[in-house]
Image (cartoon, helix red, strand yellow):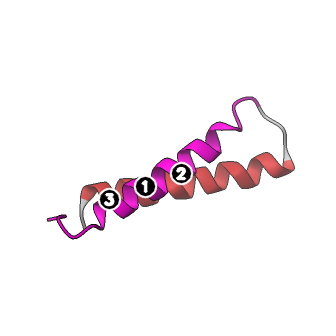
Amino acid sequence: MHPTFGAGVALALAGLGGYVAGVHVSYPGRAFSLTALMAGVTLALVGRGEGAT
């Protein structure tokens, strides 16, 4: 597995967990969970690309 793909999946899962927690409980910085989710999906797709070794 490419390290970028693994980091992207981990970041996307963390962002998704933060989003779900933010739906139930208001906490400061919960908007960053969407940023983490989008960045994680992007990293996972880049790490999965054709040129990945």
The residue to which callout 2 is attached is 38
Q: Residue at x 69, y 31 (%)?
A: 29
Q: Quadrant of residue 35?
A: top right
Q: CA distance from mark 3 to mark 1?
A: 6 Å
Q: Residue at x 78, y 34 (%)?
A: 27
Is 36 part of what is drawn in magenta? Answer: yes
Tags 1 and 2 touching, CB below 8 Å: yes
Left or right: 14 as drawn, with respect to 18: left
Q: Amino acid at mark 2?
A: Met
* Element carrying mark 2: helix
Quarter of the figure with the C terminus = bottom left
Q: Position of residue 8 (x, y in %)?
A: 41, 55
Q: Residue at x 43, y 55 (%)?
A: 42
Query: Is disc 2 surrounded by few (<14), some (14 to 19) or many (20+) residues within 10 Å?
Result: some
Q: Position of residue 33 (x, y in %)?
A: 63, 44
The residue to which callout 1 is attached is 42
Q: Amino acid at mark 3?
A: Val
The extreme top residue here reads 28
Question: Magenta residues, as a range?
Answer: 28-53
Report the magenta stretch's main SS. helix
* Element carrying mark 3: helix
